[in-house]
């Protein structure tokens, strides 16, 4: 026997309630933020209970893994909205465009141009977010804040890509609020309305700072092994 929790006892509900509470405390409308359930490393059996209670928005960080899990789940749940939240290699751009409804990790010109190449072949481009390396960490993907405005002009205006917002992953050892405030400022000054920020440890803070999407994995599925 597998130990599947009763739907109403699933930690998903506690996280959802915390999102609602944080929004209400910030004076924000209940529908002003979307919970992106991060299902990376989770098998379909772990994802199914969350689908069964009606949730439809999920995040994966690897194209290969998403390709192995989601087409089958989509046969049963065709209204799934899948977000790519991990780095994307240029040679997987075409596959990612087919698989994901939102790509949150546009982070360099080469990738933007790979999307354009696919579009020229007739592939439609999903909603795009630009990942910003707000902490300027050398090991982390993302556009540096000082290079962002020019990169937005390139993607949105020169290449006509559907850039809708920004995403960040703050440095683990720093106060996330500073990074959330910076991302909010960068989005506003560029006329972008989507802000994907906040994970299990800090999504309430992110909502306070205007997150429209929070990406939560371990608080829902437990620690990843
Ligand atoms: C894994 C991951 C998350 C979820 O992190 P948790 O701490 O498990 O909530 C969010 N965003 C990105 C980009 C991730 O890779």
Image (cartoon, rainbow, N blue to C red):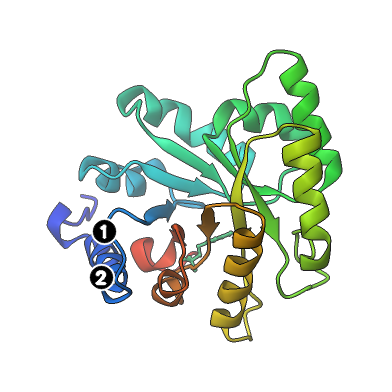
94 horizontally vs 37: left or right: right
Front-most of residues 10 and 184: 184
Front-most of residues 196 and 221: 196
Q: CA distance from mark 1 to mark 2?
A: 7 Å
Q: Residues within 10 Å of mark 2 (few under 14, many from 20)?
A: some
Q: Position of residue 12 (x, y in %)?
A: 27, 59
Secondary structure at numbered mark 2: helix
Which residue in the rendered view is the most extreme toward the right?
Answer: 110
Q: Note whether 23 is above or below 105 in the view shown.
A: below
Q: Note whether 146 is above or below 124 in the view shown.
A: below
Q: Position of residue 10 (x, y in %)?
A: 22, 60
Q: Which residue corresponds to the image point at 49% horizontal and 48% vertical from the top-left? A: 59
Front-most of residues 73 and 173: 173
172 horizontally vs 70: left or right: right
Q: Residues within 10 Å of mark 1 (few under 14, many from 20)?
A: few
Q: Note whether 102 is above or below 73 in the view shown.
A: below
Secondary structure at numbered mark 1: loop
User: In this figure, what is the number of numbered marks?
Assistant: 2
Residue matched to label 2: 24
Q: Note whether 43 is above or below 131 in the view shown.
A: above
Q: Position of residue 83 (x, y in %)?
A: 52, 43
Residue 19: quadrant of the picture: bottom left
Q: Which residue corresponds to the image point at 51% horizontal and 52% vertical from the top-left? A: 41
Residue 11: quadrant of the picture: bottom left
Q: Are marks 1 and 2 in contact (CB under 8 Å)?
A: yes
Residue 30, numbered circle? 1
Task: Compare marks 1 and 2 and give the one earlier in the sequence.
Answer: 2
Q: Position of residue 30 (x, y in %)?
A: 26, 59
Residue 22, numbered circle? none
Which residue in the rendered view is the most extreme toward the top?
Answer: 122
Label 2 CB, ligand 1: below 8 Å? no
């Amino acid at each position: 026997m597998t130990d599947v929790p009763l739907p109403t006892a699933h930690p998903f509900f506690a996280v959802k309630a915390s999102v609602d509470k944080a929004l209400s405390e910030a004076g924000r409308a209940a529908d002003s933020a979307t919970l992106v359930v991060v299902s990376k490393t989770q098998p379909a059996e772990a994802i199914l209970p969350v689908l069964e209670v009606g949730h439809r928005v999920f995040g994966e960080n690897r194209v290969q893994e998403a390709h192995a899990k989601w087409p089958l789940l989509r046969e049963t749940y065709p209204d799934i909205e899948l977000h790519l939240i991990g780095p994307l290699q240029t040679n997987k751009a075409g596959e990612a465009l087919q698989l994901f409804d939102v790509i949150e990790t546009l982070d360099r010109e080469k990738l933007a141009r790979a999307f354009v190449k696919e579009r020229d072949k007739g592939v439609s481009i999903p909603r795009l977010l630009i990942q910003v390396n707000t902490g300027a960490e050398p090991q982390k993907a993302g556009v540096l804040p000082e290079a962002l405005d020019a990169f937005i002009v390139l993607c949105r205006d020169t290449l006509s890509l559907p850039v809708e917002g920004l995403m960040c992953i703050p440095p683990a050892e720093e106060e996330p609020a500073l990074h959330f405030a910076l991302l909010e400022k960068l989005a506003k000054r560029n006329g972008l309305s989507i802000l994907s920020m906040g994970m299990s440890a800090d999504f309430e803070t992110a909502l306070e700072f205007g997150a429209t999407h929070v990406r939560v994995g371990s608080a829902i599925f437990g620690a990843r092994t």
